[in-house]
Image (cartoon, helix red, strand yellow):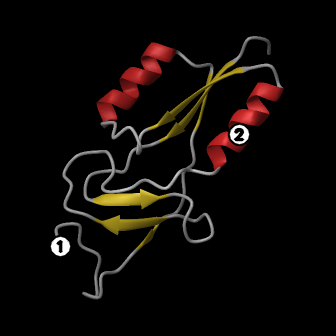
Amino acid sequence: MANCRVMILNLPSPPGMDVERDFAGSYGTASPVRRTRYGHSGDVVFPVFMPYLATAVTWQGWSVHIVDGQAQRLTADAVVSVVLEQQPDFIVSLVFLLSPIFCGCGAWNADG
């Protein structure tokens, strides 16, 4: 497939939790936060898969566009807008079975 456009997408963390997709042996973790919007709280850990995948894509002669929804603090609507604007042929994103981090209270609760 010549002139293929690939978007590598690191989705923003959902409201109520910060998602670290490269933690816990790449299973990912989710920590409760008080943020009520999509995005990410505090510092974002750079997703290691993105440059490796981008390199493989460019070796195939395809164009690549990287969107880091966490680092850019994108909302869900902003992610959709970027995808519609870029019109990629393929979107690659990591999805993990997240391990909620318990805060010593016996149960995970995004409201604290």
Residue 18: x and y, percent? 36, 59
Callout 1, which amino acid?
Gly
Sequence-wise, the earlier of marks 2 and 1 is: 2
Find residue 60 and report its image quarter. Answer: top right
Residue 37: x and y, percent? 22, 46
Find residue 103 and report its image quarter. Answer: bottom left
Residue 83: x and y, percent? 46, 23
Q: Viewed as shown, does residue 19 lie left or right of 110?
A: right
Q: Viewed as shown, does residue 19 lie left or right of 104?
A: right
Q: Which residue is mark 2?
A: 53
Residue 97: x and y, percent? 52, 63
Circle 1 SS class: loop
Q: Which residue is mark 1?
A: 112
Q: In the picture shown, does residue 77 fall above or below 112?
A: above
Callout 2, which amino acid?
Leu
Query: Which of 54 and 36 lies nearest the eye of the viewer?
Result: 54
Q: In the picture shown, does residue 73 fall above or below 61?
A: below
Query: Which of 15 and 40 lies nearest the eye of the viewer?
Result: 40
Q: Residues within 10 Å of mark 1 (few under 14, many from 20)?
A: few
Which residue is most to the top?
3
Query: Which of 85 and 48 lies nearest the eye of the viewer?
Result: 48
Residue located 63% across and 70% down the image? 25
Residue located 71% across and 39% down the image? 53
Q: Nearer the viewer, mark 2 or mark 1?
A: 2
Which residue is most to the front?
43
From mark 2 to mark 1, how far is it between C-alphas? 37 Å
Residue located 63% across and 51% down the image? 48
Circle 2 SS class: helix
